[in-house]
Image (cartoon, rainbow, N blue to C red):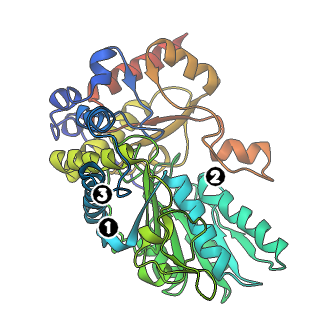
Amino acid sequence: MVSTCNISLDLLRAPVLDTDALRQAFPIFAANPDLMYLDSAATSQKPQLVLDTIEQYFAKNCANAGRASYSWSSQLQNAIESTRQKVASFINCQPNNLAFTSGATESLNTVAMAWGLFNLADGDEIMLCPKDHKSAILPWYNLQKILAAQGKQISIKHFGIHEVGDYELKEIKAGLSPKTKLIALTHVHHVFGLDMEIPEIRGIVGPDVLISLDASQSIGHEPIDVVGLTCDFMSFSGHKMFAAPGVGGLYVHDRAKDAMQPIKLGGKSPVSVSGGLKVEAKNLGELLEVGTQNIPAILSLGRAVDFINEIGQQNIQKHVSNLTVYLWQKMKDLPGVYFAPGIGVCGCEEGFGILAFRLEQVASSDLAFTLDAEDIFVRSGDHCAYLQDKGKEDAAEAQDDYIRVSMHAYNTFDEIDQFVQVLECVIKN
C-alpha cells in the first residue's frame, strides 16, 4: 500500500473531463461564481436535470404512485420501477434485490433490525471498526441493547485502522471465531479516503460471514459492482451522487434477503392475516418499503444515474483520483501540515476524492472559518466519528480536529491551486 508517488503535476492536469462544460450543468455555480465547494463527501451539488425532475413532479404530475387507477398514479409507479431497474443495473444487481430507503443511515439501520433482530442468537458476534462512520456502528449497539432486553447477549468485536489508513487485516483475522456472523465495513472511508480492500477481507472472513458495506463515499464516483465487492448488504445515499436528499438504496444478496423480516408494515405491505400475520413479499421492495415513498427524490435518483452514465463513471473516477493526488502533491511540502491516515500518509498513486489534514499553526475549526470567508467550503469537527471510550489523544489520531477536503467531478485543478494559495497565506500569517 505504501508508495512514494511523484506523478507529474502536468500529467495529473491532463484533461479527463471538460469541467467548464460540466459545471454549467450545475446552477449552484452560476448563482455563486466565487464558490469553491470542497465538501462533496457531505453532499453533492445537483445538476439541472435533477432539479427539473423534482420540479416537474410537484408542478406537473403530483400524485401518489400506484395508489389509484388514474394515469398519473400508474405512470409514477412505472417510473419508480424503471428507476429501480436503472439503479440496480448501476450497481450490478437484480431489481428484486434493491429497496429504496431514505438514505444510507436508514439502510444501515434496516440491516441491523430486519436481519440482525431475527437472525442473531445468544453468544453470536458482530465485527466492526470504531473509526468508521457512526451510522455504520451505532445500529449494531442499538441492536445489542434490544436483544439484551430479550435475554440474548451478542458480542461486538472491534478492529482498527492501520497507520496508513486502511483496515488492520491482522486484527480482523485474529478477531474471527465460529460465532462471527457479520462484519460491518465501509467501501471508501469517510475521513481517511482509501478503498478499504473489501474483496481481500472476504478472503479473510470466508464465505459464511455476512458483509454489510457502507458505500456512501464511493457510490457517486467509483464503479460499484456488488458481485465483485462480495458483499451481502450494501447501503448508499442518493444525495452524495447528485440526487435529492431523502433517497437511498439497500442492496441485499439472496441468502440474506431470504432471512430478513419486515420491521415496518403499512398499506402496501403484502400480508395475510389468516392464521396469524404473515408477510408474503416477493422482492426486497415489497418487504421493506412502506407508506408513501419520497417519489420526487426517487425519480431524481434515476436522473442522477443517467447523468453519471452520460459523463462516464470511469471518467469521473479518473478525474477525482487525479484531483486528489494533485492536492496531496501541492500540499505535502507545506510547513506545519499533518495529514490524517490516507493518501497523505501512504502517498498512493490513486485517490478517492478525500484528503484530511490539520495545520500546526491554527486550529482546524478556526481554519474552517477562515476558508469560509474565502467562499471555500470544507468540513471540520468530529466527522461523525464514533469515539466512545477513546482517550483524547487517540481521538486526535483518528478523526477529530482534521479538515476534510472532498471533491467531485465538478471540481477543478485551478480550485486546488487557489485553495493551496490560501493555505500558504494562513501559514505565513
Q: Is residue 190 above or below residue 149?
A: above
Q: Is residue 14 left or right of residue 337?
A: left
Between disc 2 and disc 1, whose residue precedes? 2
Q: Could you tell me residue 359's position as x and y percent?
A: 58, 27
Q: For mark 1, what is the residue?
A: 225
Q: CA distance from mark 3 to mark 2?
A: 43 Å
**Residue 418 figure quarter:** top left
Q: Secondary structure at mark 3?
A: loop
Amino acid bearing label 1: Asp
Q: Looking at the image, can residue 152 be seen?
A: yes
194 or 67, which is in the foreground? Answer: 67
Q: For mark 2, what is the residue?
A: 134
Q: For mark 3, what is the residue?
A: 69
Q: Residue at x 75, y 44 (%)?
A: 393
Q: Residue at x 54, y 63 (%)?
A: 266
**Residue 74 figure quarter:** bottom left
Between disc 3 and disc 2, whose residue precedes? 3
Between disc 3 and disc 1, whose residue precedes? 3
